[in-house]
Amino acid sequence: MLFIGTTAARRKLLSVLLWGIFGAGLFVQAFAPRLKIRDGAFIIPPPLVSEAQEVNPAEIVKKERRMQLLSGVLTAGGALGLACYYRRVLFRSCPP
């Protein structure tokens, strides 16, 4: 079991966690399936269409929107967390 007893270790763990959340958001965005739009209609990728399976375009669009929402929440949440974590470095006051 991991024991986090010191403040420095807790801060390090928080940093790794925030970077992990941010990276997970970018990972979801990079590897999520994309729906292409041509002439005002969705182009359904061939792997999603098979002879034995019925295609429901509403479900495909719903899944795409969920992936985009998940990616946005993870990326934005991680970025805001990192901005708060590194606020002293980012907003260092300049001497006169």
Image: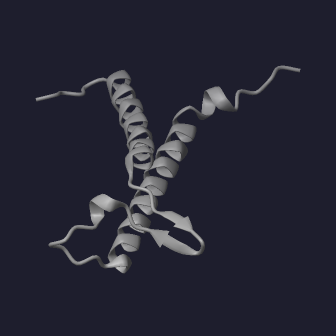
**Residue for point 10% across, 29% down:** 1
Horizontal side of 60 relative to 38 (left or right) equals left
Figure check: 14 above or below 37 = above
**Residue for point 14% across, 72% down:** 52
Q: How many marks?
A: 0
Q: Position of residue 29 (x, y in %)?
A: 44, 49
| Colour setup of the view | one colour
Q: Position of residue 55 (x, y in %)?
A: 28, 76
Horizontal side of 26 relative to 47 (left or right) equals right
Figure check: 14 above or below 7 = below
Residue lying at the far front of the rendered structure: 51
Horizontal side of 83 relative to 45 (left or right) equals right
Please tell me which residue lies in front, 3 or 42: 42
Residue lying at the far right of the rendered structure: 96
Residue 67 occupies quadrant: bottom left
Residue lying at the far left of the rendered structure: 1
Please tell me which residue lies in front, 53 or 59: 53
Q: Position of residue 4 (x, y in %)?
A: 24, 28
**Residue for point 48% across, 48% down:** 75
Please tell me which residue lies in front, 38 or 96: 38
Q: Position of residue 65 (x, y in %)?
A: 43, 67
**Residue for point 45% across, 43% down:** 26
Figure check: 82 above or below 76 = above
Figure check: 74 above or below 96 = below
The C terminus, quarter of image:
top right
